[in-house]
């Protein structure tokens, strides 16, 4: 075999095994990196690929926050299955162009086949459906706003916002994802068009507050067109009351978009599915397989009951494109992207290898591990600050709450030890919380126990004044 391929296979196998024994956190001297690169590579001359592969592997191993590590309790970019590694290699190999259906019928059909199976679990099987892969949740959210604008204002695609008499506005919860702020800017709606609806005590959108906001906007001459419910907020896993939002939106003739970027995976789990009831009534849904389905990043998905509105948003005529399918099957006329990578293969392979129910069992197991984490924290004297069935835990401690120990100090100690990673988050009405999330299918009981033990030790060292805060670099040696 080609020695480069042999080396690649060796690294794929070795890294997957090694990562558990490596520090999660890289050494904190990033400023040296550009010098290190300049010392290793002179880009005016060529290098053998085998050497480059070894160098890149060594650099990635050392200078990366290892979010595939089972003790990375951070945001949603967990370990991937080998299916993703294989898929991304094959995609680079065949490099299929999915812009037009004609250029890669099989890739386009594998994507639609996969999306229809997932749409079925969302409860969208009985309706006309537009579905496609996106770079991530942010692109899917952008697509939703554009489709909703086209549905509500049929002249939008042609004449744009400036032809409208009333300023369109849309509603999101206070914990909704920041991508909607970018979307408001990119669509020309402007940040002022984003209405943040207050939540209840568990940060779920308050439907009564939504109703009065819509009423006030209507009487002030604004044009409400869309409500975004989040199924699993990024910060605390709050699930907005989707069924109530759906009936409110039907009454008011507003588009309901559900941002289920990470929480969407819960529909695969028998135990969690009930918490997302109402999602099937959404006009559109964002779901990102990279967040909680063990798929490599760049695996967003957009689902919509109104193919016509999506087509209106993206329709274009290009005489140089080889096929122009009359039924809108060409992704370049029904999505944001033009040249289109075969994003769906890694999702297809992951789903097909596990089966949707098999993936659902893994989701279940991670949710249970989240419960274990909550229980262990409480038993060790920590206090849980959020309320969600999803495995994201926001917590604090009496010693932190009374101002004795800043949460940033706890984090600093943990990260300088390098053996686990989590983040902090600002929760409305509560302040700073530590936040640990389990989305890695390889995280186990021992990882959760380790985390709680380590945090409690750090806390007791900090309160005794025996902490070595600030004096130590990474504790684990780096090979
Ligand atoms: C991560 C996230 C997004 C953005 O998705 P990307 O894949 O990062 O573009 C949107 N909404 C929610 C709720 C998220 O958690």
Image (cartoon, helix red, strand yellow):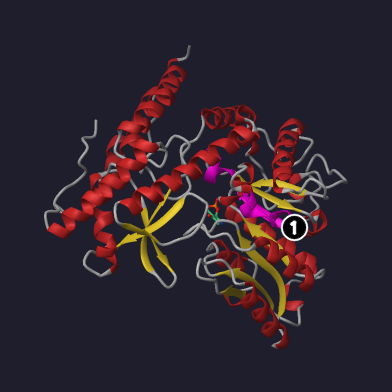
Residue shown at 74% from the left, 66% from the top: 247
- Tell me, yes or no, whether the highlighted magenta stretch contains residue 281: yes
Front residue of 338/86: it is 86
- In what element is the residue under mark 1? helix
Front residue of 374/59: it is 374
| The C terminus lies in quadrant | top left
The span picked out in magenta is: 274-296
Horizontal and vertical percent for residue 455? 27, 50
Q: Label 1, on which residue?
A: 281
Horizontal and vertical percent for residue 337? 67, 49
Residue shown at 19% from the left, 46% from the top: 473
Front residue of 28/359: it is 359
Horizontal and vertical percent for residue 56? 37, 33
Q: Quadrant of residue 329?
A: top right
Left/right placement of residue 408 relative to residue 430 reads left
Residue shown at 72% from the left, 45% from the top: 119
Front residue of 243/93: it is 243
Horizontal and vertical percent for residue 406? 25, 64
Q: Is residue 43 visible?
A: no
Left/right placement of residue 265 relative to residue 326 reads left
Q: Is residue 339 visible?
A: yes
Q: Quadrant of residue 114?
A: top right
Residue shown at 24% from the left, 34% from the top: 478
Q: Can you tell me whether the CB of the residue at mark 1 lies under 8 Å from the nearest atom of ligand 1?
A: no
Dot 1 alpha-carbon crowd within 10 angstroms: few under 14, some 14 to 19, many 20 or more: many
Left/right placement of residue 430 relative to residue 293 reads left
């Amino acid at each position: 075999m080609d020695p480069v391929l042999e080396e690649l296979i060796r690294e794929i196998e070795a890294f997957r095994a090694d990562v558990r024994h490596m520090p999660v956190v890289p050494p904190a001297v990033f400023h040296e990196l550009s010098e290190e690169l300049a010392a290793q590579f002179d880009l005016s001359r060529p290098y053998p690929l085998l050497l480059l592969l070894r160098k890149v592997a060594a650099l990635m191993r050392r200078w990366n926050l290892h979010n595939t590590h089972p003790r990375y309790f951070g945001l949603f970019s967990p370990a991937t299955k080998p299916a993703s590694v294989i898929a991304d290699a094959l995609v680079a190999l065949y490099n299929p162009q999915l812009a037009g259906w004609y250029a890669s019928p099989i890739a386009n059909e594998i994507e639609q086949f996969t999306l229809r199976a997932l749409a079925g679990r969302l409860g969208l099987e009985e309706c006309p459906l537009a579905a496609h892969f996106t770079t991530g949740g942010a692109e899917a959210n952008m697509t939703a706003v554009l489709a909703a604008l086209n549905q509500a204002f049929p002249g939008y695609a042609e004449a744009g916002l400036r032809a409208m008499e009333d300023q369109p506005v849309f509603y999101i919860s206070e914990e909704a994802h920041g991508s909607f702020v970018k979307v408001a800017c990119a669509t020309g709606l402007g940040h002022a068009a984003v209405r943040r609806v207050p939540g209840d005590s568990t940060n779920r959108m308050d439907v009564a507050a939504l109703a009065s906001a819509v009423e006030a906007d209507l009487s002030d001459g604004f044009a409400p067109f869309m409500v975004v419910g989040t199924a699993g907020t990024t910060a605390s896993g709050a699930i907005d009351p989707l069924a109530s939002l759906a009936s409110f939106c039907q009454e008011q003739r507003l588009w309901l978009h559900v941002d289920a970027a990470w929480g969407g995976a819960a529909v695969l789990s028998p135990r969690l599915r009930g918490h997302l009831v109402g999602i099937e009534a959404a006009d559109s849904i964002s779901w990102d397989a990279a967040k909680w389905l063990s798929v490599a990043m760049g695996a967003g998905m957009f689902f919509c009951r109104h193919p016509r509105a999506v087509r209106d948003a993206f329709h274009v005529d290009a005489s140089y494109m080889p096929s122009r399918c009359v039924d809108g099957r060409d992704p370049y006329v029904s999505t944001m992207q033009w040249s289109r990578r075969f994003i769906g293969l890694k999702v297809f392979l992951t789903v097909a290898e596990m089966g949707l129910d098999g993936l659902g069992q893994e989701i279940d197991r991670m949710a249970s591990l989240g419960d274990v984490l909550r229980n262990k924290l409480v038993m060790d004297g920590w206090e849980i600050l959020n309320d969600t069935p999803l495995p994201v835990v926001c917590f604090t401690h009496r010693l932190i709450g009374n101002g004795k120990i800043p949460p940033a100090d706890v984090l600093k100690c943990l990260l300088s030890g390098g053996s686990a990673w989590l983040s902090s988050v600002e929760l409305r009405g509560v302040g700073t919380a530590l936040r640990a999330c389990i989305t890695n299918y390889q995280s186990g009981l021992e990882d959760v126990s380790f985390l709680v033990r380590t945090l409690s030790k750090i806390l007791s060292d900090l309160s005794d004044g025996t902490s070595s805060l600030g004096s130590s670099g990474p504790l684990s040696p780096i090979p």
